[in-house]
Image (cartoon, helix red, strand yellow):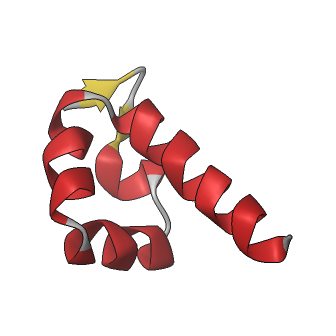
Amino acid sequence: MTRRGCTKEHFFSEADMETINMDDRLKDLVKIDSKMVKKILRNREYAAQQ
C-alpha cells in the first residue's frame, strides 16, 4: 500500500510497528487506513503524558 511514495514501513517508526503488531485491531486497521492508525498512536502518546 503506497501513498505518495511512502510505504507503511517508512510511515511508521520501529516503536510504532511493534505497537501495531501487538494490537490486533490496529493490525487490521493499518491495511485499510494507515493515517488513522498514526492518529490513534499519537493520541495514545498524548494521553500517556497527561
Residue positioned 73% across, 63% down in the render: 47
Residue 18 lies in quadrant: bottom left
| Corner quadrant of residue 45 | bottom right
Quarter of the image containing the C terminus? bottom right
| Residue situated furthest top in the rendering | 4
Q: Residue 21: x percent and y percent?
A: 22, 72
Could you tell me residue 11's position as x and y percent?
46, 48
Image: 46 above or below 48? above
Q: Residue at x 45, y 33 (%)?
A: 35
Q: Nearer the viewer, residue 17 or 48?
A: 48
Tell me what residue is drawn at x 51 percent, y 47 percent. 40
Quarter of the image where one finds residue 30: top left
Rendered residue at 27%/54% (across/down):
26
* Position of residue 34 measured from the top left corner of the image (x, y, whole percent): 35, 37
- Horizontally, residue 2 falls left or right of residue 44, namely left
Quarter occupied by the N terminus: top left
In the rendered structure, the answer to whether residue 1 lies left or right of residue 47 reads: left
Q: Is residue 33 left or right of residue 42?
A: left
Q: How many marks?
A: 0
Judging depth in this view, the residue of 23 and 5 nearest the camera is 23
